[in-house]
Image (spheres, rainbow, N blue to C red):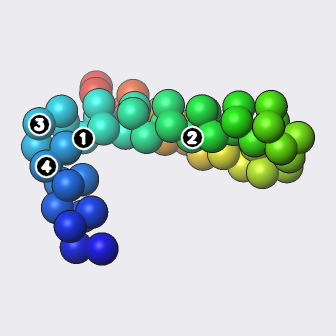
Amino acid sequence: MKANKVDLEDTIDVDGLAETLEKLGDICFEKSEHLVSNWQDAGAAAQWEKAAFLIHAVARKIKL
């Protein structure tokens, strides 16, 4: 667990917090698409999509 935290901190140090959040938001969108296309789980997909929108919104605010 600690190694993952260090890896995330290293990513933030290299790319910046806003860019790291953008990447996390993109991953959420990809998970949403995967759930719809492979598992037909619209409910879980909607939750991932909502997370993606919120994370992207925070990333945009940080960039300002």
At a point 19% along the width and 43% down the height, the residue shown is 11
Q: Earlier in the sequence, mark 1 or mark 4?
A: 4
The image quadrant of residue 51 is: top right
Crowd rating for badge 1 (residues with CA inside 10 Å; few <14, some 14–19, many 20+) = some
Asked if residue 30 is positioned above or below residue 13 in the image, the reply reads above
Crowd rating for badge 3 (residues with CA inside 10 Å; few <14, some 14–19, many 20+) = few
Alpha carbon separation for disc pair 1 and 4: 11 Å
At a point 60% along the width and 33% down the height, the residue shown is 29
* Rendered-image quadrant of the N terminus: bottom left
Q: Which residue is mark 2?
A: 28
Inspect the image, locate mark 1, and give the three-letter code of the amino acid beneath it.
Leu
At a point 37% along the width and 39% down the height, the residue shown is 21
Q: Which residue is mark 1?
A: 17
Inspect the image, locate mark 4, and give the three-letter code of the amino acid beneath it.
Asp
Which residue, as the protein is rendered here, is positioned at the far front? 38
Q: Looking at the picture, how far across and down is residue 28, in whole percent? A: 57, 40
Asked if residue 5 is positioned above or below residue 42 in the image, the reply reads below
Q: Looking at the picture, how far across and down is residue 48, in whole percent? A: 66, 45
Asked whether the beta carbons under mark 4 and mark 3 sit within 8 Å of each other, the answer is yes
Q: Which residue is mark 4?
A: 10
Q: Which mark is residue 25?
A: none
Asked whether the beta carbons under mark 3 and mark 1 sit within 8 Å of each other, the answer is no
Check disc 2 and report its element: helix, strand or loop: helix
Crowd rating for badge 2 (residues with CA inside 10 Å; few <14, some 14–19, many 20+) = many
Inspect the image, locate mark 2, and give the three-letter code of the amino acid beneath it.
Cys
Q: Which residue is mark 3?
A: 14
The image quadrant of residue 20 is: top left
Q: Earlier in the sequence, mark 4 or mark 2?
A: 4
